[in-house]
Image: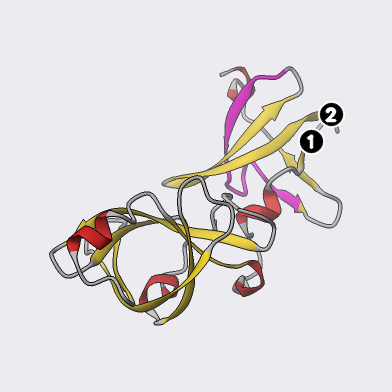
Amino acid sequence: MSESTTTIETAWLAIGQIVAPQGLRGEMRVNPSSDFPERFLIPGPRWLRRPRQTEPEVVELERGRAIAGKNLYIVQLAGITSREQAEALRGCELLVPASDRPELDEGEFHVLDLIDLSVIDQASSTPLGIVRDVVSAGNDLLVVELTDGREVYIPFVEAIVPVVDLAQGRIEITPPPGLLEL
């Protein structure tokens, strides 16, 4: 997995959500939705979308650090110098332009590229459904809406998902017995 499926428009990628202030000097805890730590560690422009707003505003990341043992980052944004200012940003999303997507290695995929792909049973060529989301849970899970309307979680591992064909807009799966009946 790489970036969150949450987008404002196709021009933006959500990289994390501000979940709480940290300390008294305006630092904030961010729950990341990106697998790229540099999004939170390297200073530079980011964009902030407040709840119930559609247009993001530019902000400057001054510094960031990971919290050891937790999937959280502490960030400092320019102009945010008090706990109260940081608290006012709770629930805001941090964004980057979609054009800033990092290059991936062979066999790696951006989450947004997987959404809306058709899911096909490799053995029978039967259409099974559509990928609606990807959830991180140890191994990534594809959230698939089956043709009958049910939703199932399919482990995104090569043994079960041997083919991802972005050009054809499809994923082929070899589900073990019972996986689609859950």
**Left-right relation of 39 to 79:** right
Residue 161 magenta-highlighted = yes
**Residue 126: mark in rendering:** 2
Give the position of the N terminus as an image quadrant. bottom right
**Residue 86: mark in rendering:** none
The x and y percentages for residue 50 are 45, 53
Residue type at mark 1: give it.
Answer: Ile
The x and y percentages for residue 151 are 61, 25
Q: Residues within 10 Å of mark 1 (few under 14, many from 20)?
A: many
Is tag 2's residue or tag 1's residue first in the polypeptide sequence?
Answer: 1
The x and y percentages for residue 145 are 68, 28
Number of numbered markers:
2
Q: Are marks 2 and 1 in contact (CB under 8 Å)?
A: yes
Residue at the spot 39% in from the left edge and 82% down from the top edge: 43
Cα gap from disc 2 to disc 1, whole angstroms: 6 Å
Q: Which residues are magenta?
A: 149-164
Residue at the spot 61% in from the left edge and 53% down from the top edge: 8
Specify whether residue 123 is in view: yes
Q: Is residue 75 above or below residue 16?
A: below
Q: Farthest residue in the left direction? A: 24
Label 2 element class = loop
Q: Which residue is mark 1?
A: 120
